[in-house]
Amino acid sequence: MTRYDYSETTMEYDCRRRMRAQGIITAIEVCNYNHSIDLAWITREGLIYAVELKLTDWKTALKQAVYHQNSVDFVSVAMPPHRITKPMKAAFMDVGVGYLEYQRPDKFNGDDFSHPFVVMISPSKNEIHAGFFLNDQNGIRGRIIRQHERDLNESIKFVEAFSNKSGVTNER
């Protein structure tokens, strides 16, 4: 039993919802060889960020994040507010993985679209990746874009179906 009243899956969907509201192309559970990236996004500059989300076990999250360094530009671990110890900070800095504090939205404000993270330790640019997959549509970039487009298309279909059932039209 954890001390939180939410799960990692809840964190994933909350982060994705809030980032998409800001116009950021996001995807969850993106396949990366025989692992998956919990949350990934592409910046306007074309950089790929990956985040490993965990409620409590920062050591496991750090190991998983290091695995993703070969496929993305920046990798971080995100956890609920947590005391950062000296050994923890040293471990993150030694491998170039960032540490983000997950900011849960206010329970009483359902329209909270603020950014879900506060940067506690900045990630280093992964030189191994360094644009290697820039035009690889089967790589991480292509998977993120395809998932984002698929979700947008499903949302559009839902809105159109709802509009047709409720008699709402775009005609004047």
Image (cartoon, grey):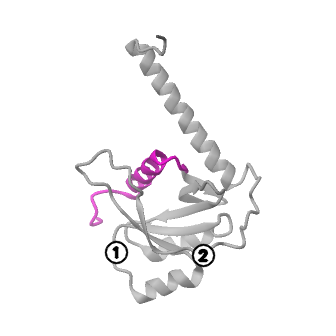
Mark closer to the chain start, 2 or 1: 1
Residue named by callout 2 = 124
Work out whether 30 lies above or below 154. Answer: below
The residue that appears at 56% across and 62% down in the rendered structure is 50
Q: Say what secondary structure mark 1 lies in.
A: loop
Disc number lying in front (2 or 1) = 2
Work out whether 94 lies above or below 73. Answer: below
Q: Quadrant of residue 47?
A: bottom right
- Point out the stretch of residues depicted in magenta: 1-26
| Kind of residue at disc 1 | His
Residue 77 horizontal/vertical position (percent) = 48, 69
Q: Nearer the viewer, residue 115 or 155?
A: 115
Residue 36 horizontal/vertical position (percent) = 58, 58
Residue 10 lies in the magenta-colored region: yes
Residue 12 horizontal/vertical position (percent) = 44, 54
Q: Nearer the viewer, residue 93 or 7?
A: 93
Numbered badge on residue 151: none
Tell me whether circle 2 and circle 1 mark residues in contact (CB < 8 Å).
no
Q: Left of 6 or right of it: where is 164? A: right
C-alpha gap between disc 2 and disc 1: 21 Å
Q: Quadrant of residue 84?
A: bottom left
Looking at the rendered image, the quarter that the N terminus falls into is: bottom left
Residue named by callout 1 = 82
